[in-house]
Every structure is written in structure tokens, then in C-alpha cells.
Image (tube, rainbow, N blue to C red):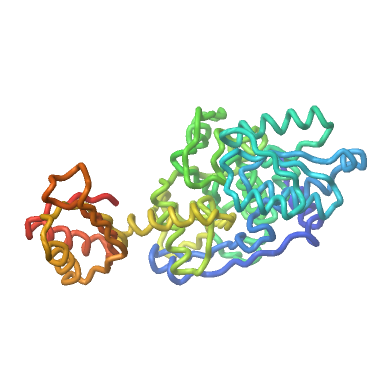
Amino acid sequence: MLSLADVEAARDRIADAVRRTPLLYSFSFSEMTGADVHLKLETFQRTGAFKLRGATNRIATLSEAEREAGVVTASAGNHAQGVALAATRAGVDSKIVMPEHAPISKIEATERYGGEAVLHGADYDEAQARAHEIEREEGRTYVHAFDDETVMAGQGTIGLEIVEDCPEVGTVVVPVGGGGLIAGIATAVKAIDPEIRVVGVQVEGAASLPQSFETGEIHELDAVNTIADGIATRKVGEKPFAVIKERVDEVVTVTDEETAVALTYLLERSKTLVEGAGAVPLAAVLFEAFDYEDGETIVPALCGGNIDTNQLTTVLVRGLVETGRYLKIRTVLRDRPGALDDLVEIISERRANIYAIQHDRTSRDVAMDEADVEIDIETRGHDHIDELLSALREAGYEVEVLA
């Protein structure tokens, strides 16, 4: 099984290629949770995610014949970029199969790092099947995203940095997709201090590990659906799972909505942009998915920051909705002069700010002497929303909350 010596050897092997990323105390999140929260900012890694560590370690161990034949892999995006950059630095040709719906930003980044992107399948598992076909057809070496001990050892170097930079750490919180990251981190931190707790986190729409962890057998999902595309796998790998069973203390889940809130708070409070998978560990802390003591030192591992711009907009809006900062309503007005002014006056009197208004006099959903109105409103929290909705309804408006 993966050992501390493997992780330490990986650190020496990849030292020239990867950055030692910051680990910073967060006053905001410590105050919000009562814990002593330090953020491991792997978002500052080259390629914007932790995957470069494992990919670099794996490619460094290729034989000369394997280097000549090139490598192939499958990835939702971050592993793709890690393999592309690591292979290019080593003078190795790389071909990366990505799901057809992979974010455009990740596809373009993979190609900029020198990899050839091949789009195939609806999710990671279908992309992986195509990658193995290419492995057989072209004689390339398959660089697995997580089910490879050399890759796991590379990811585990994050654990070494966490313990060295925050020796008082009590709990490390790690996102889980295929399991390579948490297996590597758990191996490192548990070998250094067995008392450090390691908590794995998945999103409900891609949560195969809780059942696997409970039964001791790998459970595979039929499908996955989550904004955290970086950890959207149907099951954990066999090699990581062997480590997880032995070295991970607890596995919990969060929702997409909680993930969106954490992402929004990170951007607002810490000026840190993360992708969905990167926000998951903080979401578990903010929404108390696991128990912790007041003042306990907790390190959420923010594993990546490669979020597609279009998805970022959607996630931020969802985060604002969940925190009561954004409200979208629909109502029907009499089609007469001043009707819209009357409605807007009630909103402004409650100190709510209007983003946009859609006023439709031709909608088939209302009578011919009525107008359909949708309004996007900036609000200051759930109490403010309740106050505004009550005022509108008391004034006789039938209001439908759309978001």
C-alpha cells in the first residue's frame, strides 16, 4: 500500500515542476464557524489545480520506450491540463480524452499546454473507455487520474505541505472524486501524526463513497449530476479505496446549493476563485457536515480554481439566491399608466435594488388588459426578502417567487 516514503520520493521528483502553494489563515471563515480555519490554496498551483503533482510524478517514472510511445488519459479537465503540461515539459506526446460537455476553458487550456484534446462521451467514465481504446490502438501509456499509486503519491505532497505549514492542524477536509487526492493526503498526514483527522467530502449528486465507506465495497453510481465537475465520477478507484478504508476517518456529503454558497463566500470574503470541487471542503465546514470543536484547527484543501466563466455566472447567482442576496419574482399588473411605477415604489421603499425588469403586455398567460412582469432584485438577506414579499402581498399583488 502507498507509504510516506512514496510521497516523500514524489516530492523530490516533482520539486522543479510544481509550486508549494500557500496555506493561509481565514479570519472570516474562522469567525463564521467558530473553528480555526486555514485554507490550503492549491488554486495557485500551476494549471490551477492539484493534478499537476500526480501527473508529473507519473510521467517522471516512464521508461524510455514509454516516453517514445506517448501517453493518453481521460479527464474532466484538471487532470487533462496536468498531464498535458507534465508531458510537454518532459518531451512526451500526450493525448487527452475529455467528456463532450467539458468546459471550453479547460479544453483550450489543455491544448495550450501541448496536449491533444479528444472529446468523447457524456461523462468521465465514457471518456475513460475511449482513452483505453486509444491506449490499445496506439501503444500509449495510460496515465490514470486517480487509480495509480504513483499519481496518488504526487497528490500526497499536499499533505506534507499542510502539516509542515500548519503543525497544529486537527482536521484536514478533502474533496473526493476518484479518491486519489484524499488517499495521498491521508497517507502523508496520518504517517506524520495519526491523530490528525481526515474527512472526505462528496457532493450529493456524485456521492458514491459514503455507501462504499460504510459497506467496505466499492459502490458505483448509474449517473452523476453536480456543479462540481472536477469530482463528478461514478465511483472511487480500487487503489485509492484501499487507502481510504484504512486512513480516512469520515466521509460526508454537501449539496450543490451549499457548494455554491461556499464558492460565493470564497470570492467575496477571501478574494479566491475556486471551481465547484474546490469549494466542497469549505462547504462541509460552513454547513457543519461533520462535527468539530470550537477553536479546532481545520484545513479545507481547495483543490482547484478552473471554473468555466459561464458556469461561474450560474453558480454565483445560485449562491446569491441561497444567501438571500438575489430574488426573482413574477406578478401581473393592470395594463394602465402608472401601474409599474406603483410596484417599483414598494420595492424601493423597502431599500431593495432592481437589477432588471421584463414587462410583457403581449403574454398569452395573462388577460388582454393585463401585463406580465418579472423583476430581478438585489436583497440583503432572507429577512429582507420576507419583508419585501409581505409588503407586496399586503398591497394586493399576487407574487410568484421564481428564484
The image shows residue 123 at horizontal and vertical percentages of 57, 35
Answer whether residue 246 is visible to the viewer in this image: no
Q: Quadrant of residue 1?
A: top right
Q: Residue at x 50, y 31 (%)?
A: 223
What percent of the width, then of the height, locates residue 63? 89, 41
Q: Give the vertical position of 69 relative to 87 (above or below).
A: above
- Residue at image x 23%, y 53%? 360
**Residue 188: horizontal and vertical position, in percent?**
67, 52
Please name whichever residue, 348 or 320, is drawn nearer the observer in this view of the structure. 348
Residue 83 at least partly seen: yes
> With 345 as the anchor, is 27 left or right in this view?
right
Furthest toward the right, the residue is 64
Depth check, front residue: 277 or 95: 95
Which of the two residues, 337 or 351, is positioned nearer the viewer here?
337
Residue 366: image location, x then y, percent: 16, 45
Residue 3 as seen in the image, left or right of residue 265: right
288 lies left or right of 337: right
